[in-house]
């Protein structure tokens, strides 16, 4: 029996589900890094993926809640494009966090969240 992949990796991910993933990441990581650092790492991921998804560039310039801005931007994209962008952002965020904290700590912080959301 094949297990369904986590919602973070599904091609049918909605903007609301993506927002829930980023909120869960922020909630889990903020006690260790602070909300500002989580947002900064997120925006670093956005900049890294903006060549592939040019519409992400608008997020980097927005003030306020960057995760709501992402959900709004995803809602305006075709579902397959939105899901692909979300997966790339999560993968980039995870890779950056692993470089900063080390694979073991980052893995412990992220795996439970990304496998349950």
Image (cartoon, grey):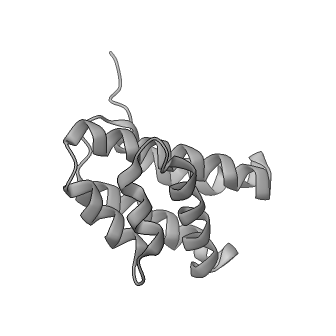
Kindly identify the residue that appears in the image at 64 percent across and 75 percent down: 37
Above or below for 59 versus 34: above
Q: Residue 68 appears in which quarter of the rendering?
A: bottom left
The residue lying toward the viewer, choosing from 110 and 91, is 91
Residue 99, percent from left and from top = 77, 50
Q: Residue 59 appears in which quarter of the rendering?
A: bottom left
Report whether 46 appears left or right of 69: right
Residue 56, percent from left and from top = 40, 57
Report whether 96 appears left or right of 100: left
Kindly identify the residue that appears in the image at 51 percent across and 48 percent down: 49
Farthest-out residue, top: 1
The residue lying toward the viewer, choosing from 115 and 10, is 10
Above or below for 114 versus 73: above
The residue lying toward the viewer, choosing from 42 and 8, is 42
Looking at the image, can residue 58 be seen?
yes
Residue 43, percent from left and from top = 54, 65
For the image, the number of numbered tags is: 0
Looking at the image, can residue 117 be seen?
no
């Amino acid at each position: 029996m094949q297990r369904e992949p986590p919602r973070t990796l599904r091609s049918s991910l909605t903007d609301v589900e993506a927002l829930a993933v980023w909120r869960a990441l922020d909630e889990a990581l903020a006690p260790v890094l602070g909300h500002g650092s989580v947002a900064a790492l997120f925006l670093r991921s956005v900049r890294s993926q903006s060549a592939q998804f040019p519409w992400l560039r608008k997020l980097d310039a927005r003030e306020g809640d960057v995760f709501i801005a992402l959900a709004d931007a995803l809602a305006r994209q075709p579902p397959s494009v939105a899901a692909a962008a979300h997966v790339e952002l999560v993968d980039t965020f995870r890779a950056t966090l692993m470089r900063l904290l080390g694979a073991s700590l980052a893995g412990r912080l992220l795996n439970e969240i990304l496998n349950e959301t």
